[in-house]
Image (cartoon, rainbow, N blue to C red):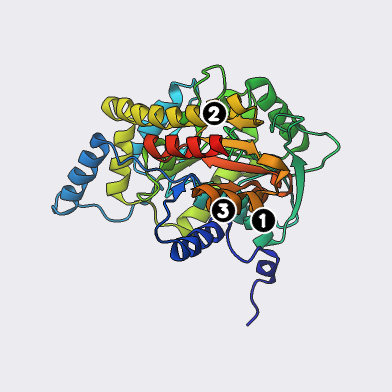
Amino acid sequence: MKINANYKNLNESYLFSTIARKVNEYKAANPQKEIIKLGIGDVTLPLVKPVVDALKKASDEMGVKETFRGYDDQIGYPFFKEAVAAYYKKKNVTLSHNEIFISDGAKSDIGNIVDIFGKDNTVLVPDPVYPVYVDTNIMDGRKIVYIAASKENGFLPLPDNKISADIIYLCSPNNPTGAAYNRDQLKLWVDYALSRGAVILFDAAYECFIADKALPSSIYEIEGADKCAVEFCSFSKTAGFTGVRCGYTIVPESLIADGVSLNKLWRRRQSTKFNGVSYIIQRGAEAVFSKDGQSEILRNIEYYMKNAGLIDNALEKKGVYHTGGKNSPYIWLECFDGRESWDFFDYLLNTCGVVGTPGGGFGETGKYFFRLTAFNSYENTRKAVEKLSAL
Ligand code: MLT
């Protein structure tokens, strides 16, 4: 038996597992010290009431013969796909049920979609980047080329015609930098992909945090994207589903690559390897789109964005270069005193008990940067900001 030798090319542990281990070690050595976690983008507010009610009701239905459900053989129930389609309609994007695939979150689908692509494709990823895009391609042995996101381009790199790529990963608002593309910038990416016959894998997991309504919240708001882009979205950050698990992936029927419908390939892949999201969870997620659900999750999003504003303002006041925090729950800042990001991680943890994510964990360009999240409580965020300001 031989293992997939590509795994030998991965970092020994996944970024957030390494951070969790370091924090646990620190906690064990300093049990009396307070720790404020602004590291992994995990939410802290509970599920909103309309979602909880829908989950309970659906659970009850599962205990009654007439309303019990078994396999979901359509990769998403029609009632839920209808709710997703209606949400996109508000963005002036028309989707058929066939184009919507319900998932257990963006990470799984982003990781799994590479199954339908040849291993000899060249992959283009911005650097810094959400590690899943890189790791899943390393696992398959694909060639990866990087395009630098930096202070010079405001952490929003644009296509370079000298770079040849077949698969392009974009995330806007971005994880980790919090920077968000405008329409003209996204159009340049769509045109680049169309001109090369490349496919864009667009991660829209943070779309609900866009406050500036002039910014696109779906790549399908850009003309031509339905012929070159797959979009991934999730309820994790939108509605506190990190522990519930639900998301959706859009694969347009008009997306043809290598002479084949990617929609058909993805359906083939999913119907073989995935048995769908439970009825109960889909009912809970459907409630996110209800009138009450929308107004309650908006309140939670505003709560997190108030935290983001606290961090953003403090850094602004101190003249620390940073991006994000305005249309994103992530703030990406330059490490103080020219420190390297893992050193900065230890420094913050040891001096003030604040946990963030070292930029170097997202790629070479992040080596002197650091990511903070707005997902902790207001009180803890304020405390962390005071400690950081004092530093
Ligand atoms: C992050 O912190 O980057 C995210 O929470 C990771 C994820 O969503 O998988």
277 vs 145, left or right, is: left
- Counting other residues with Cα less than 10 Å from the Cα at mark 1, is it few (<14), some (14-19), or many (20 or more)? many
In percent of the image, x 50 and y 64: which residue is there?
Answer: 25
* Frontmost residue, 78 versus 300: 300
Q: Residue 314 shows which numbered tag?
A: 2
Which amino acid type is shown beneath numbered disc 2? Answer: Ala
Q: Secondary structure at mark 3?
A: helix
Which residue is farthest right? 162
Residue 44, by quadrant, is top left
Examine the rendered structure and indicate whether residue 2 appears above or below residue 183.
below
Dot 3 amino acid type: Gly
Q: Amino acid at mark 1?
A: Asn
Label 2 crowd (10 A; few <14 / some 14-19 / many >=20):
some
Quickly name the residue at label 3. 111
Could you say which quadrant of the image residue 172 lies in? top right
Q: Which mark is residue 137?
A: 1
Q: Quadrant of the N terminus?
A: bottom right
Q: Position of residue 124 (x, y in %)?
A: 73, 44
At x 77%, y 37%, the residue is: 196
Q: Nearer the viewer, residue 263 or 158?
A: 158
Is 365 placed left or right of 77 in the picture? Answer: right
Mark 2 to mark 3: distance in Å?
Answer: 36 Å
Q: Are marks 1 and 3 in contact (CB under 8 Å)?
A: no
Asked whether, in this view, residue 376 is left or right of residue 228, the answer is left
Residue 259's x, y, as percent?
Answer: 69, 44
Q: Position of residue 258 (x, y in %)?
A: 70, 45
> SS class of the residue under badge 1?
helix
